[in-house]
Protein backbone atom coordinates (compact mmCIF):
# COMPACT_ATOMS: atom_id res chain seq x y z
CA UNK A 1 0.00 0.00 0.00
CA UNK A 2 2.71 2.44 0.88
CA UNK A 3 5.68 2.74 -1.38
CA UNK A 4 9.02 4.09 -0.28
CA UNK A 5 9.53 7.42 -2.01
CA UNK A 6 13.02 6.62 -3.13
CA UNK A 7 14.67 3.41 -4.16
CA UNK A 8 17.35 3.74 -1.52
CA UNK A 9 16.33 0.84 0.59
CA UNK A 10 15.19 -2.48 -0.74
CA UNK A 11 14.34 -3.75 2.67
CA UNK A 12 10.86 -2.31 2.73
CA UNK A 13 9.16 -5.23 1.10
CA UNK A 14 5.78 -4.57 2.61
CA UNK A 15 6.00 -7.50 4.96
CA UNK A 16 7.48 -5.53 7.81
CA UNK A 17 5.54 -2.69 9.33
CA UNK A 18 8.55 -1.57 11.34
CA UNK A 19 12.19 -2.07 10.43
CA UNK A 20 14.89 -0.91 12.77
CA UNK A 21 18.53 -1.24 11.77
CA UNK A 22 21.51 -0.41 13.98
CA UNK A 23 19.71 2.30 15.82
CA UNK A 24 21.82 4.36 18.22
CA UNK A 25 20.83 7.20 20.46
CA UNK A 26 23.05 9.30 22.67
CA UNK A 27 21.77 11.71 25.29
CA UNK A 28 24.90 13.75 25.75
CA UNK A 29 27.43 11.09 26.64
CA UNK A 30 24.87 8.53 27.73
CA UNK A 31 24.48 5.77 25.19
CA UNK A 32 20.77 5.05 25.44
CA UNK A 33 20.35 2.77 22.42
CA UNK A 34 23.10 0.50 21.18
CA UNK A 35 22.80 -0.86 17.66
CA UNK A 36 19.20 -1.80 18.13
CA UNK A 37 17.96 -3.96 15.26
CA UNK A 38 14.55 -5.56 14.97
CA UNK A 39 11.53 -5.93 12.72
CA UNK A 40 7.85 -6.00 13.38
CA UNK A 41 5.77 -7.87 10.83
CA UNK A 42 2.41 -6.64 9.67
CA UNK A 43 -0.33 -7.71 12.02
CA UNK A 44 2.03 -8.60 14.80
CA UNK A 45 1.67 -7.49 18.42
CA UNK A 46 5.22 -7.06 19.59
CA UNK A 47 5.84 -6.66 23.29
CA UNK A 48 8.71 -4.38 24.10
CA UNK A 49 9.85 -5.39 27.51
CA UNK A 50 12.51 -3.96 29.72
CA UNK A 51 13.26 -2.36 33.04
CA UNK A 52 12.71 1.37 33.38
CA UNK A 53 15.41 3.29 31.59
CA UNK A 54 16.26 0.46 29.20
CA UNK A 55 15.44 2.52 26.14
CA UNK A 56 11.85 1.58 25.38
CA UNK A 57 10.47 5.10 25.32
CA UNK A 58 13.49 6.37 23.42
CA UNK A 59 12.94 3.77 20.72
CA UNK A 60 9.26 4.63 20.50
CA UNK A 61 9.98 8.32 20.30
CA UNK A 62 12.33 7.71 17.41
CA UNK A 63 9.78 5.54 15.63
CA UNK A 64 7.07 8.15 16.03
CA UNK A 65 9.24 10.94 14.65
CA UNK A 66 9.38 12.76 17.97
CA UNK A 67 13.16 12.71 18.01
CA UNK A 68 15.77 11.66 15.47
CA UNK A 69 18.19 8.80 16.09
CA UNK A 70 21.90 9.55 16.55
CA UNK A 71 22.68 6.94 13.93
CA UNK A 72 21.07 4.00 12.21
CA UNK A 73 17.77 3.84 10.38
CA UNK A 74 14.21 3.06 11.23
CA UNK A 75 11.36 2.61 8.81
CA UNK A 76 7.67 2.55 9.54
CA UNK A 77 5.30 1.37 6.80
CA UNK A 78 8.23 1.69 4.42
CA UNK A 79 9.06 5.31 5.25
CA UNK A 80 12.21 6.49 6.92
CA UNK A 81 11.37 8.04 10.28
CA UNK A 82 13.83 10.85 9.76
CA UNK A 83 13.71 11.60 6.04
CA UNK A 84 9.97 11.09 5.67
CA UNK A 85 8.96 11.99 9.15
CA UNK A 86 5.58 13.43 8.21
CA UNK A 87 4.66 10.36 6.16
CA UNK A 88 5.57 8.16 9.11
CA UNK A 89 3.65 10.28 11.58
CA UNK A 90 0.57 10.12 9.36
CA UNK A 91 0.66 6.32 9.55
CA UNK A 92 1.29 5.93 13.23
CA UNK A 93 -1.00 6.05 16.20
CA UNK A 94 0.95 6.83 19.32
CA UNK A 95 0.01 6.62 22.94
CA UNK A 96 2.86 8.16 24.94
CA UNK A 97 3.48 7.05 28.48
CA UNK A 98 2.04 10.33 29.76
CA UNK A 99 -1.27 10.34 27.95
CA UNK A 100 -1.35 13.68 26.11
CA UNK A 101 -4.78 15.02 27.02
CA UNK A 102 -6.13 18.57 27.07
CA UNK A 103 -7.96 18.47 30.35
CA UNK A 104 -10.33 21.32 29.54
CA UNK A 105 -11.72 19.70 26.39
CA UNK A 106 -14.55 17.24 26.05
CA UNK A 107 -13.77 13.76 24.78
CA UNK A 108 -15.46 14.44 21.47
CA UNK A 109 -13.76 17.81 20.91
CA UNK A 110 -10.40 16.36 21.73
CA UNK A 111 -10.78 13.39 19.41
CA UNK A 112 -12.04 15.67 16.64
CA UNK A 113 -8.97 17.83 17.09
CA UNK A 114 -6.64 14.85 16.82
CA UNK A 115 -8.55 13.56 13.79
CA UNK A 116 -8.22 16.93 12.06
CA UNK A 117 -4.56 17.08 12.94
CA UNK A 118 -4.22 13.78 11.09
CA UNK A 119 -6.21 15.10 8.12
CA UNK A 120 -9.05 12.64 8.57
CA UNK A 121 -11.73 13.35 5.95
CA UNK A 122 -14.87 12.33 7.80
CA UNK A 123 -14.04 13.56 11.26
CA UNK A 124 -17.35 12.84 12.97
CA UNK A 125 -17.56 9.29 11.68
CA UNK A 126 -13.96 8.60 12.68
CA UNK A 127 -14.50 10.00 16.17
CA UNK A 128 -17.67 7.96 16.65
CA UNK A 129 -15.90 4.83 15.51
CA UNK A 130 -12.93 5.39 17.83
CA UNK A 131 -15.18 6.10 20.81
CA UNK A 132 -17.16 2.97 20.11
CA UNK A 133 -14.04 0.81 19.90
CA UNK A 134 -12.84 1.88 23.32
CA UNK A 135 -16.31 2.02 24.87
CA UNK A 136 -16.37 5.75 25.39
CA UNK A 137 -19.48 6.65 23.46
CA UNK A 138 -21.57 7.46 26.51
CA UNK A 139 -18.85 9.80 27.77
CA UNK A 140 -18.49 11.80 24.55
CA UNK A 141 -19.56 15.01 26.28
CA UNK A 142 -17.46 14.62 29.44
CA UNK A 143 -14.66 17.04 30.15
CA UNK A 144 -11.46 15.01 30.10
CA UNK A 145 -10.15 16.53 33.31
CA UNK A 146 -13.10 15.06 35.17
CA UNK A 147 -12.65 11.52 33.88
CA UNK A 148 -11.13 8.71 35.92
CA UNK A 149 -7.71 7.38 35.08
CA UNK A 150 -9.18 4.39 33.29
CA UNK A 151 -11.35 6.52 31.07
CA UNK A 152 -8.48 8.87 30.34
CA UNK A 153 -6.43 5.92 29.21
CA UNK A 154 -9.25 4.96 26.87
CA UNK A 155 -9.35 8.48 25.49
CA UNK A 156 -5.61 8.13 24.94
CA UNK A 157 -6.08 4.90 23.01
CA UNK A 158 -9.00 6.38 21.05
CA UNK A 159 -6.72 9.28 20.15
CA UNK A 160 -4.15 6.82 18.81
CA UNK A 161 -6.62 4.95 16.58
CA UNK A 162 -8.91 7.73 15.42
CA UNK A 163 -7.11 8.10 12.09
CA UNK A 164 -6.91 4.33 11.53
CA UNK A 165 -3.13 4.15 11.46
CA UNK A 166 -1.20 1.20 10.04
CA UNK A 167 0.93 0.97 13.12
CA UNK A 168 0.04 1.50 16.76
CA UNK A 169 2.74 2.37 19.24
CA UNK A 170 1.63 2.14 22.84
CA UNK A 171 4.00 3.16 25.61
CA UNK A 172 3.00 1.46 28.86
CA UNK A 173 -0.71 1.44 28.03
CA UNK A 174 -1.83 -0.09 31.32
CA UNK A 175 0.30 1.93 33.72
CA UNK A 176 -1.60 3.29 36.69
CA UNK A 177 -4.81 1.38 36.02
CA UNK A 178 -6.62 -0.84 38.48
CA UNK A 179 -6.70 -4.59 37.78
CA UNK A 180 -10.11 -4.56 36.14
CA UNK A 181 -9.15 -1.69 33.89
CA UNK A 182 -5.91 -3.44 33.03
CA UNK A 183 -7.84 -6.47 31.84
CA UNK A 184 -10.12 -4.26 29.76
CA UNK A 185 -7.24 -2.44 28.14
CA UNK A 186 -5.45 -5.70 27.37
CA UNK A 187 -8.55 -7.09 25.74
CA UNK A 188 -8.86 -3.92 23.76
CA UNK A 189 -5.26 -4.20 22.59
CA UNK A 190 -5.79 -7.80 21.54
CA UNK A 191 -8.86 -6.75 19.59
CA UNK A 192 -6.98 -3.88 17.94
CA UNK A 193 -4.23 -6.30 17.03
CA UNK A 194 -6.54 -7.89 14.49
CA UNK A 195 -6.44 -4.76 12.33
CA UNK A 196 -3.24 -3.00 13.34
CA UNK A 197 0.38 -3.75 13.80
CA UNK A 198 1.13 -2.99 17.41
CA UNK A 199 4.32 -2.24 19.26
CA UNK A 200 3.64 -2.19 22.95
CA UNK A 201 6.04 -1.40 25.73
CA UNK A 202 5.70 -2.53 29.27
CA UNK A 203 7.64 -3.57 32.29
CA UNK A 204 4.80 -5.74 33.48
CA UNK A 205 5.35 -9.31 32.41
CA UNK A 206 1.91 -10.90 32.40
CA UNK A 207 0.94 -8.19 29.98
CA UNK A 208 3.30 -9.60 27.42
CA UNK A 209 2.29 -13.21 27.77
CA UNK A 210 -1.35 -12.22 27.61
CA UNK A 211 -1.37 -9.81 24.73
CA UNK A 212 1.68 -10.22 22.55
CA UNK A 213 2.57 -12.57 19.77
CA UNK A 214 6.27 -11.87 20.17
CA UNK A 215 8.48 -10.41 22.86
CA UNK A 216 11.58 -8.34 22.62
CA UNK A 217 13.48 -7.88 25.83
CA UNK A 218 15.62 -4.79 25.91
CA UNK A 219 18.31 -4.03 28.44
CA UNK A 220 20.65 -1.06 28.55
CA UNK A 221 19.63 -0.11 25.05
CA UNK A 222 20.40 -3.54 23.64
CA UNK A 223 18.21 -6.47 22.73
CA UNK A 224 18.66 -9.14 25.36
CA UNK A 225 16.25 -11.66 23.88
CA UNK A 226 13.63 -12.02 21.19
CA UNK A 227 11.07 -14.81 21.06
CA UNK A 228 7.45 -15.75 21.59
CA UNK A 229 6.32 -15.48 25.20
CA UNK A 230 6.16 -19.28 25.41
CA UNK A 231 9.46 -19.71 23.61
CA UNK A 232 11.26 -17.48 26.05
CA UNK A 233 10.03 -19.54 28.97
CA UNK A 234 11.17 -22.87 27.57
CA UNK A 235 14.37 -21.48 26.16
CA UNK A 236 15.50 -20.34 29.54
CA UNK A 237 14.65 -23.53 31.35
CA UNK A 238 17.46 -25.81 30.26
CA UNK A 239 17.02 -27.30 33.69
CA UNK A 240 14.05 -27.88 35.90
CA UNK A 241 13.78 -26.73 39.44
CA UNK A 242 12.22 -28.43 42.44
CA UNK A 243 11.42 -26.66 45.62
CA UNK A 244 11.90 -28.67 48.81
CA UNK A 245 11.22 -27.66 52.36
CA UNK A 246 12.09 -29.89 55.29
CA UNK A 247 11.40 -29.65 59.01
CA UNK A 248 14.92 -30.57 60.10
CA UNK A 249 17.52 -28.91 57.94
CA UNK A 250 20.96 -30.48 58.06
CA UNK A 251 24.26 -29.51 56.45
CA UNK A 252 24.59 -32.85 54.69
CA UNK A 253 21.25 -32.60 52.87
CA UNK A 254 22.60 -30.94 49.70
CA UNK A 255 25.38 -33.49 49.24
CA UNK A 256 22.98 -36.35 49.87
CA UNK A 257 20.46 -35.01 47.35
CA UNK A 258 23.13 -34.53 44.72
CA UNK A 259 23.73 -38.27 44.79
CA UNK A 260 20.35 -38.82 43.18
CA UNK A 261 20.74 -39.38 39.48
CA UNK A 262 19.69 -36.40 37.38
CA UNK A 263 20.15 -33.84 40.12
CA UNK A 264 22.52 -31.16 38.91
CA UNK A 265 22.83 -28.90 41.91
CA UNK A 266 21.18 -28.08 45.20
CA UNK A 267 20.99 -24.54 46.48
CA UNK A 268 20.03 -24.23 50.12
CA UNK A 269 18.18 -21.07 51.04
CA UNK A 270 19.04 -19.12 54.19
CA UNK A 271 18.86 -21.90 56.75
CA UNK A 272 15.07 -22.12 56.91
CA UNK A 273 15.08 -25.64 55.56
CA UNK A 274 14.22 -24.82 51.95
CA UNK A 275 16.28 -26.07 49.06
CA UNK A 276 16.20 -25.31 45.38
CA UNK A 277 17.01 -28.51 43.49
CA UNK A 278 18.07 -28.34 39.89
CA UNK A 279 17.50 -31.38 37.72
CA UNK A 280 17.99 -32.19 34.08
CA UNK A 281 15.07 -31.55 31.74
CA UNK A 282 12.10 -33.93 31.60
CA UNK A 283 13.46 -35.94 34.44
CA UNK A 284 11.09 -35.80 37.37
CA UNK A 285 13.00 -36.88 40.49
CA UNK A 286 10.39 -35.91 43.04
CA UNK A 287 9.62 -39.52 43.97
CA UNK A 288 13.28 -40.29 44.70
CA UNK A 289 13.73 -37.07 46.64
CA UNK A 290 10.66 -37.80 48.74
CA UNK A 291 11.81 -41.36 49.41
CA UNK A 292 15.25 -40.16 50.51
CA UNK A 293 13.78 -37.47 52.74
CA UNK A 294 11.53 -40.01 54.42
CA UNK A 295 14.21 -42.66 55.00
CA UNK A 296 16.64 -40.06 56.41
CA UNK A 297 13.88 -38.58 58.56
CA UNK A 298 14.23 -34.95 57.35
CA UNK A 299 10.49 -34.39 57.62
CA UNK A 300 9.19 -33.17 54.26
CA UNK A 301 7.01 -30.08 54.54
CA UNK A 302 6.78 -29.19 50.90
CA UNK A 303 7.89 -30.62 47.61
CA UNK A 304 6.89 -29.00 44.34
CA UNK A 305 8.20 -28.28 40.88
CA UNK A 306 9.17 -24.69 40.13
CA UNK A 307 8.31 -23.39 36.70
CA UNK A 308 10.33 -20.51 35.44
CA UNK A 309 7.85 -17.76 34.87
CA UNK A 310 8.38 -15.08 32.33
CA UNK A 311 9.21 -12.97 35.31
CA UNK A 312 12.24 -15.12 36.12
CA UNK A 313 13.31 -15.09 32.52
CA UNK A 314 13.01 -11.37 32.49
CA UNK A 315 15.03 -10.97 35.64
CA UNK A 316 17.68 -13.34 34.42
CA UNK A 317 17.95 -11.59 31.10
CA UNK A 318 17.90 -8.09 32.38
CA UNK A 319 20.12 -8.57 35.40
CA UNK A 320 22.91 -10.66 33.99
CA UNK A 321 26.37 -9.72 35.22
CA UNK A 322 25.94 -6.02 35.07
CA UNK A 323 29.17 -4.91 36.68
CA UNK A 324 28.14 -1.33 36.21
CA UNK A 325 24.76 -1.73 37.79
CA UNK A 326 24.31 -1.75 41.49
CA UNK A 327 21.11 -3.77 41.32
CA UNK A 328 21.73 -7.18 42.80
CA UNK A 329 18.66 -9.07 43.75
CA UNK A 330 20.39 -12.40 43.77
CA UNK A 331 21.89 -13.34 47.10
CA UNK A 332 24.97 -14.64 45.35
CA UNK A 333 26.11 -13.52 41.98
CA UNK A 334 27.44 -17.00 41.24
CA UNK A 335 23.88 -18.27 41.33
CA UNK A 336 22.87 -15.85 38.68
CA UNK A 337 25.78 -16.81 36.52
CA UNK A 338 25.19 -20.50 36.99
CA UNK A 339 21.71 -20.21 35.60
CA UNK A 340 22.94 -18.24 32.63
CA UNK A 341 25.38 -20.88 31.62
CA UNK A 342 22.57 -23.21 30.90
CA UNK A 343 21.19 -21.05 28.14
CA UNK B 1 -2.67 25.58 6.06
CA UNK B 2 -5.19 23.15 7.47
CA UNK B 3 -2.72 22.24 10.20
CA UNK B 4 -2.35 25.88 11.20
CA UNK B 5 -6.11 26.34 11.32
CA UNK B 6 -6.59 23.14 13.32
CA UNK B 7 -4.06 24.27 15.91
CA UNK B 8 -5.43 27.81 16.01
CA UNK B 9 -8.99 26.55 16.29
CA UNK B 10 -8.22 24.37 19.28
CA UNK B 11 -6.35 27.19 20.93
CA UNK B 12 -9.23 29.63 20.46
CA UNK B 13 -11.70 27.11 21.82
CA UNK B 14 -9.45 26.71 24.79
CA UNK B 15 -9.52 30.48 25.36
CA UNK B 16 -13.30 30.39 25.38
CA UNK B 17 -13.20 27.72 28.07
CA UNK B 18 -10.63 29.45 30.20
CA UNK B 19 -11.79 31.83 32.93
CA UNK B 20 -8.48 33.65 32.63
CA UNK B 21 -9.26 34.82 29.10
CA UNK B 22 -12.59 36.26 30.24
CA UNK B 23 -10.91 37.99 33.17
CA UNK B 24 -8.39 39.56 30.81
CA UNK B 25 -11.15 40.74 28.49
CA UNK B 26 -13.08 42.18 31.42
CA UNK B 27 -10.04 43.96 32.85
CA UNK B 28 -9.16 45.35 29.47
CA UNK B 29 -12.69 46.57 28.82
CA UNK B 30 -12.95 48.10 32.28
CA UNK B 31 -9.67 50.00 32.14
CA UNK B 32 -10.09 51.23 28.58
CA UNK B 33 -13.60 52.41 29.43
CA UNK B 34 -12.45 54.09 32.61
CA UNK B 35 -9.56 55.83 30.88
CA UNK B 36 -11.77 56.97 28.00
CA UNK B 37 -14.19 58.59 30.39
CA UNK B 38 -11.35 60.41 32.13
CA UNK B 39 -9.92 61.61 28.85
CA UNK B 40 -13.22 62.88 27.51
CA UNK B 41 -14.15 64.59 30.77
CA UNK B 42 -10.80 66.31 30.97
CA UNK B 43 -10.33 67.33 27.34
CA UNK B 44 -14.01 67.84 26.45
CA UNK B 45 -13.02 66.80 22.93
CA UNK B 46 -13.86 63.95 20.62
CA UNK B 47 -10.25 62.81 20.62
CA UNK B 48 -9.13 59.51 22.06
CA UNK B 49 -5.46 59.55 21.08
CA UNK B 50 -4.22 59.33 24.70
CA UNK B 51 -6.34 56.18 25.05
CA UNK B 52 -4.14 54.29 22.63
CA UNK B 53 -1.04 55.05 24.67
CA UNK B 54 -2.87 53.44 27.55
CA UNK B 55 -3.96 50.50 25.44
CA UNK B 56 -0.31 49.88 24.65
CA UNK B 57 0.50 49.92 28.38
CA UNK B 58 -2.38 47.59 29.17
CA UNK B 59 -1.29 45.31 26.35
CA UNK B 60 2.18 45.18 27.84
CA UNK B 61 0.69 43.83 31.05
CA UNK B 62 -2.07 41.62 29.66
CA UNK B 63 -0.64 40.13 26.46
CA UNK B 64 1.86 37.90 28.30
CA UNK B 65 -1.10 36.58 30.30
CA UNK B 66 -2.80 35.74 27.03
CA UNK B 67 0.22 33.92 25.66
CA UNK B 68 1.74 32.33 28.76
CA UNK B 69 -0.02 29.01 28.37
CA UNK B 70 0.54 28.57 24.64
CA UNK B 71 3.50 26.25 25.05
CA UNK B 72 4.00 26.04 28.80
CA UNK B 73 0.76 24.13 29.15
CA UNK B 74 1.64 21.76 26.31
CA UNK B 75 4.90 20.94 28.04
CA UNK B 76 3.22 20.45 31.39
CA UNK B 77 0.38 18.27 30.11
CA UNK B 78 2.70 16.33 27.83
CA UNK B 79 0.47 17.21 24.90
CA UNK B 80 3.50 18.63 23.12
CA UNK B 81 4.32 15.00 22.35
CA UNK B 82 0.96 14.70 20.60
CA UNK B 83 1.68 17.78 18.50
CA UNK B 84 5.27 16.83 17.69
CA UNK B 85 4.26 13.34 16.56
CA UNK B 86 1.33 14.56 14.48
CA UNK B 87 1.81 15.03 10.74
CA UNK B 88 2.36 18.76 11.11
CA UNK B 89 5.51 20.81 10.78
CA UNK B 90 6.86 22.56 13.84
CA UNK B 91 6.44 26.02 12.34
CA UNK B 92 2.81 25.27 11.53
CA UNK B 93 2.18 24.51 15.18
CA UNK B 94 3.86 27.75 16.19
CA UNK B 95 2.06 29.87 13.61
CA UNK B 96 -1.27 28.30 14.56
CA UNK B 97 -0.76 29.24 18.17
CA UNK B 98 0.45 32.70 17.26
CA UNK B 99 -2.65 33.32 15.17
CA UNK B 100 -4.95 32.17 17.93
CA UNK B 101 -3.33 34.46 20.48
CA UNK B 102 -3.34 37.35 18.05
CA UNK B 103 -7.02 36.83 17.37
CA UNK B 104 -7.47 36.74 21.15
CA UNK B 105 -5.70 40.08 21.36
CA UNK B 106 -7.93 41.54 18.66
CA UNK B 107 -10.97 40.38 20.61
CA UNK B 108 -9.68 42.47 23.52
CA UNK B 109 -10.02 45.57 21.37
CA UNK B 110 -13.64 45.00 20.46
CA UNK B 111 -15.08 46.60 23.65
CA UNK B 112 -13.06 49.75 22.96
CA UNK B 113 -15.09 50.26 19.80
CA UNK B 114 -17.88 51.27 22.11
CA UNK B 115 -15.92 54.42 22.96
CA UNK B 116 -15.77 55.21 19.26
CA UNK B 117 -19.53 54.81 18.98
CA UNK B 118 -20.01 57.24 21.87
CA UNK B 119 -17.61 59.75 20.31
CA UNK B 120 -19.44 59.57 17.02
CA UNK B 121 -22.75 60.12 18.74
CA UNK B 122 -21.71 63.20 20.67
CA UNK B 123 -18.89 64.62 18.64
CA UNK B 124 -16.97 64.53 15.44
CA UNK B 125 -13.96 62.23 15.81
CA UNK B 126 -11.22 62.02 13.19
CA UNK B 127 -11.67 58.57 11.72
CA UNK B 128 -8.34 58.81 9.94
CA UNK B 129 -6.49 59.04 13.22
CA UNK B 130 -8.71 56.41 14.80
CA UNK B 131 -8.12 54.03 11.90
CA UNK B 132 -4.37 54.52 12.03
CA UNK B 133 -4.40 54.07 15.80
CA UNK B 134 -6.30 50.78 15.59
CA UNK B 135 -4.01 49.58 12.82
CA UNK B 136 -1.04 50.46 14.99
CA UNK B 137 -2.49 48.61 17.98
CA UNK B 138 -3.08 45.50 15.83
CA UNK B 139 0.56 45.44 14.84
CA UNK B 140 1.79 46.21 18.35
CA UNK B 141 -0.34 43.27 19.40
CA UNK B 142 1.29 40.98 16.85
CA UNK B 143 4.74 41.88 18.15
CA UNK B 144 3.71 41.50 21.78
CA UNK B 145 1.98 38.19 21.18
CA UNK B 146 5.14 36.97 19.46
CA UNK B 147 7.33 37.94 22.38
CA UNK B 148 4.91 36.41 24.88
CA UNK B 149 4.68 33.19 22.89
CA UNK B 150 8.44 32.93 22.73
CA UNK B 151 8.61 33.32 26.51
CA UNK B 152 6.02 30.57 26.84
CA UNK B 153 8.12 28.22 24.72
CA UNK B 154 10.96 28.54 27.20
CA UNK B 155 9.29 27.18 30.32
CA UNK B 156 6.68 24.70 31.39
CA UNK B 157 5.73 27.07 34.18
CA UNK B 158 3.07 29.54 33.06
CA UNK B 159 3.95 32.06 35.73
CA UNK B 160 7.59 32.12 34.65
CA UNK B 161 6.42 32.45 31.06
CA UNK B 162 4.33 35.46 32.07
CA UNK B 163 7.12 37.17 33.96
CA UNK B 164 9.72 36.52 31.27
CA UNK B 165 7.32 37.73 28.60
CA UNK B 166 6.51 40.92 30.43
CA UNK B 167 10.12 41.68 31.29
CA UNK B 168 11.12 41.14 27.68
CA UNK B 169 8.41 43.55 26.57
CA UNK B 170 9.49 46.05 29.21
CA UNK B 171 13.03 45.91 27.90
CA UNK B 172 11.75 46.54 24.39
CA UNK B 173 9.70 49.44 25.72
CA UNK B 174 12.61 51.19 27.36
CA UNK B 175 15.25 50.07 24.87
CA UNK B 176 15.93 53.70 24.01
CA UNK B 177 17.02 54.53 27.55
CA UNK B 178 20.72 53.95 26.74
CA UNK B 179 20.35 56.17 23.69
CA UNK B 180 18.82 58.96 25.76
CA UNK B 181 21.61 58.58 28.28
CA UNK B 182 24.26 58.71 25.59
CA UNK B 183 22.57 61.71 24.13
CA UNK B 184 24.80 61.46 21.09
CA UNK B 185 23.58 60.83 17.59
CA UNK B 186 25.85 57.86 17.18
CA UNK B 187 24.81 54.80 15.23
CA UNK B 188 24.51 52.83 18.44
CA UNK B 189 22.18 55.37 19.96
CA UNK B 190 20.09 55.26 16.81
CA UNK B 191 19.94 51.51 16.98
CA UNK B 192 18.63 51.53 20.53
CA UNK B 193 16.16 54.23 19.67
CA UNK B 194 14.86 52.17 16.79
CA UNK B 195 14.52 49.16 19.02
CA UNK B 196 12.11 50.85 21.41
CA UNK B 197 8.42 50.08 21.09
CA UNK B 198 7.09 53.61 21.79
CA UNK B 199 9.34 55.02 19.10
CA UNK B 200 7.26 53.01 16.62
CA UNK B 201 3.71 53.36 17.85
CA UNK B 202 3.57 57.09 18.54
CA UNK B 203 3.25 57.91 14.86
CA UNK B 204 0.24 55.63 14.43
CA UNK B 205 -1.56 57.37 17.26
CA UNK B 206 -1.16 60.74 15.61
CA UNK B 207 -2.58 59.33 12.40
CA UNK B 208 0.58 58.51 10.49
CA UNK B 209 0.99 55.04 8.99
CA UNK B 210 4.66 54.58 8.24
CA UNK B 211 5.76 51.37 6.57
CA UNK B 212 8.99 51.53 8.56
CA UNK B 213 7.02 51.11 11.76
CA UNK B 214 4.89 48.36 10.27
CA UNK B 215 8.09 46.61 9.29
CA UNK B 216 9.37 46.90 12.84
CA UNK B 217 6.37 45.16 14.36
CA UNK B 218 6.17 42.54 11.63
CA UNK B 219 9.89 41.84 12.07
CA UNK B 220 9.45 41.24 15.78
CA UNK B 221 6.50 38.93 15.12
CA UNK B 222 8.37 36.94 12.47
CA UNK B 223 11.55 36.78 14.50
CA UNK B 224 9.75 35.50 17.59
CA UNK B 225 7.88 32.92 15.50
CA UNK B 226 11.20 31.68 14.11
CA UNK B 227 12.81 31.65 17.56
CA UNK B 228 9.86 29.82 19.07
CA UNK B 229 10.00 27.23 16.30
CA UNK B 230 13.69 26.69 17.04
CA UNK B 231 13.01 26.29 20.76
CA UNK B 232 10.21 23.80 20.13
CA UNK B 233 12.39 21.96 17.65
CA UNK B 234 15.22 21.79 20.14
CA UNK B 235 13.07 19.51 22.28
CA UNK B 236 13.56 16.90 19.61
CA UNK B 237 17.34 17.07 19.97
CA UNK B 238 17.65 17.58 23.71
Image: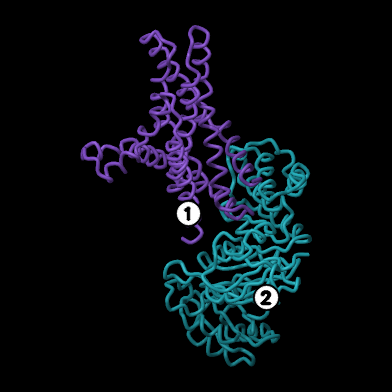
Chain colours: A cyan, B purple
- SS at mark 2? loop
Does residue A95 appear left or right of residue B131 in this picture?
right
Does residue A219 appear left or right of residue B173 in this picture?
right
Per the model, the C-alpha gap separating discs 2 and 1 is 31 Å
The chain containing the residue under callout 1 comes to B
Residue B129 against residue A296 in the figure, above or below = above
What residue sits right under mark 2 in the picture?
Answer: A9
In the foreground, A96 or B38: B38
x, y (%) of residue A119? 70, 49
The chain containing the residue under callout 2 comes to A
Residue A91 against residue B95 in the figure, above or below = below
Residue B118 against residue B143 in the figure, above or below = above
The crowd level at tag 1 (other Cα within 10 Å; few <14, some 14-19, many 20+) is: some
Q: Check if mark 2's residue and mark 1's residue have beta carbons within 8 Å.
A: no
Q: Tell me where residue A123 sits by quadrant.
A: top right
What residue sits right under mark 1 in the picture?
Answer: B230
- SS at mark 1? helix
Residue at (49, 56) in percent of width and height: B235
Does residue A189 appear left or right of residue A62 in this picture?
right
In the foreground, B122 or B41: B122
Q: Can residue B206 be seen in this view?
A: yes
x, y (%) of residue A20? 63, 72
Amino acid sequence: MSVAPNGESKSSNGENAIEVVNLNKYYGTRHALRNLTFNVKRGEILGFLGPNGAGKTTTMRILTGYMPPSSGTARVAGYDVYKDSLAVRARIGYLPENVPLYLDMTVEDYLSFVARLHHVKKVDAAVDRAMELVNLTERYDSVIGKLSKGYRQRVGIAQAIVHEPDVLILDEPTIGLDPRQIIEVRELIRALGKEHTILLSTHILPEVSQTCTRVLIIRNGEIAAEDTPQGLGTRMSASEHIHLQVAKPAPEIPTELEKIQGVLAVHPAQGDGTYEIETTLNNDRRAEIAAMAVTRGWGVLELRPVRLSLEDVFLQLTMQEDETESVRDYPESSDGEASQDQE
Amino acid sequence: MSNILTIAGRELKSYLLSPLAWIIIALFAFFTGFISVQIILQTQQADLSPLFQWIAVLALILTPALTMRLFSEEYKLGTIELLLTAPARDWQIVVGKFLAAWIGFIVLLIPTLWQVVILKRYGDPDFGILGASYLGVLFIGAAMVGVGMFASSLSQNQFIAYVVGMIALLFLWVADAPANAMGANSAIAGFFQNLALPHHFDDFFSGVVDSQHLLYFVSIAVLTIVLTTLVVQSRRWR
